[in-house]
Image: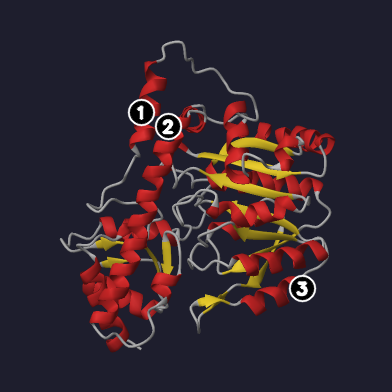
Amino acid sequence: MADSVFAHVVRAPEDPILGVTVAYNNDSSPVKVNLGVGAYRTEEGKPLVPNVVRRAEQMLVNDTSRVKEYLSITGIADFNKLSAKLIFGADSPAIKENRVTTVQCLSGTGSLRVGAEFLARHYHEHTIYIPQPTWGNHPKIFTLAGLSVKYYRYYDPATRGLDFQGLLDDLTAAPVGAIVLLHACAHNPTGVDPTIDQWEKIRQLMRSKGLLPFFDSAYQGFASGKLDADAQSVRMFVADGGECLAAQSYAKNMGLYGERVGALSIVCKDSDVASKVESQLKMVIRPMYSNPPIHGASIVATILKDRQMYDEWTVELKAMADRIISMRQQLYAAMQARGTPGDWSHIIKQIGMFTFTGLNAEQVSFMTSEYHIYMTSDGRISMAGLSSRTVPHLADAMHAAITRVA
């Protein structure tokens, strides 16, 4: 029999984040803990679908007038309007002046990809600066879309905080007009965010050099528990009248991970430009996936346009954020109680789903083999994967790794 025409294909490496879950699933230990996956878990370690999401979904299912026809290329109009309002604010001048174009996309990843392909075709500068470190998918998304990826300093391992001076120096050295990816809040993987004063300095620097901001907002409301507070960085860049892009995901804040619900908004100088930009976004989307799926975005629109359901969502969202903050406090207290060498205050200073522990790859490997704790080799842990039951086990493992592995 002849060889396959694909016989030359080389096996691709396992995705480092998804690979953690594969290894976890193959472990039969009763004490195993998965802190690799970027998804919320309850105190019992179970996935959570917010009650308000279940209710909205039931309403949609019960409405027999609903059909499964194709959406338009840009998706559900209500969903797009409400998504822009959520991130930019109800009283945003950009929205009132029709300077924003918003298109429904396939969660955060799809929104970033559509935005990147649009920029590769229609923006004069093809270099995008992304933070070091950043989400592992970012460089791949932008490179495949046709942009050239460079890094700016972000995380300082010595302080386990922000390398603010390094960030400013690198953006100052960037070419005029370069695109800059900014995490709107709850930076992934470090959990380190600039302060409001630092954001203002970043904004002034970027505007003075004509750098184009591209925000990735995957955690609005999920970081602090407050939707408006978590969108403050984005709103500062919109308030100055300048242009920017924002990718939104509803995976975390509505628990709609597998529904792939997101939006890309581009804030333009005037409504005429916004309308032309939207026409070109359609040209990107149509040959990519024709039009977006209907179900998840219908759930989001149902919740965002009903005041009572919206309020219910904010309460459930705050409960998720508060549980993660509580896990941070419990882990920090457990490290203190064990007298683990080093300063562990970064655990409670960092924000959002992830903590950058400062553990090295050898220490992570030790914790996996000796304690059945699964996490990415860079020392990132998902605080949402912890519970009061597993915090002591993690603290024991971290203490052992710090004291026994260099």
Residue positioned 59% across, 77% down in the render = 163
* Amino acid carrying mark 2 in the image: Met
Rendered position, 87 above or below 396: above
Secondary element under disc 2, as helix, strand or loop, is helix
- Spatial CA distance of label 3 from label 1 is 49 Å
Please name which of the two marks, 3 or 2, marks the residue nearer to the observer.
Answer: 2
Q: Earlier in the sequence, mark 3 or mark 2?
A: 3
Is residue 303 among what the camera can see? yes
Provide the residue designation for mark 2.
Answer: 309
Judge left or right: residue 237 versus residue 260: right
Q: Earlier in the sequence, mark 2 or mark 1?
A: 1
- Spatial CA distance of label 2 from label 1 is 9 Å
Secondary element under disc 1, as helix, strand or loop, is helix
Q: Position of residue 13 (x, y in %)?
A: 46, 61
Q: Earlier in the sequence, mark 3 or mark 1?
A: 1
- Quarter of the image with the N terminus in it: top left
- Quarter of the image with the C terminus in it: bottom left
Number of other residues with Cα within 10 Å of mark 3, as a class: few under 14, some 14 to 19, many 20 or more? some
Number of other residues with Cα within 10 Å of mark 1, as a class: few under 14, some 14 to 19, many 20 or more? some
* Amino acid carrying mark 1 in the image: Arg
* Amino acid carrying mark 3 in the image: Thr
Q: Position of residue 361 (x, y in %)?
A: 40, 77
Provide the residue designation for mark 3.
Answer: 172
Residue placed farthest to the top in the image? 65
Number of other residues with Cα within 10 Å of mark 2, as a class: few under 14, some 14 to 19, many 20 or more? some
Q: Position of residue 46 (x, y in %)?
A: 26, 48
Provide the residue designation for mark 1.
Answer: 55
The type of colouring in the image is secondary structure
Q: Are marks 2 and 1 in contact (CB under 8 Å)?
A: yes
Q: Position of residue 255 (x, y in %)?
A: 40, 43
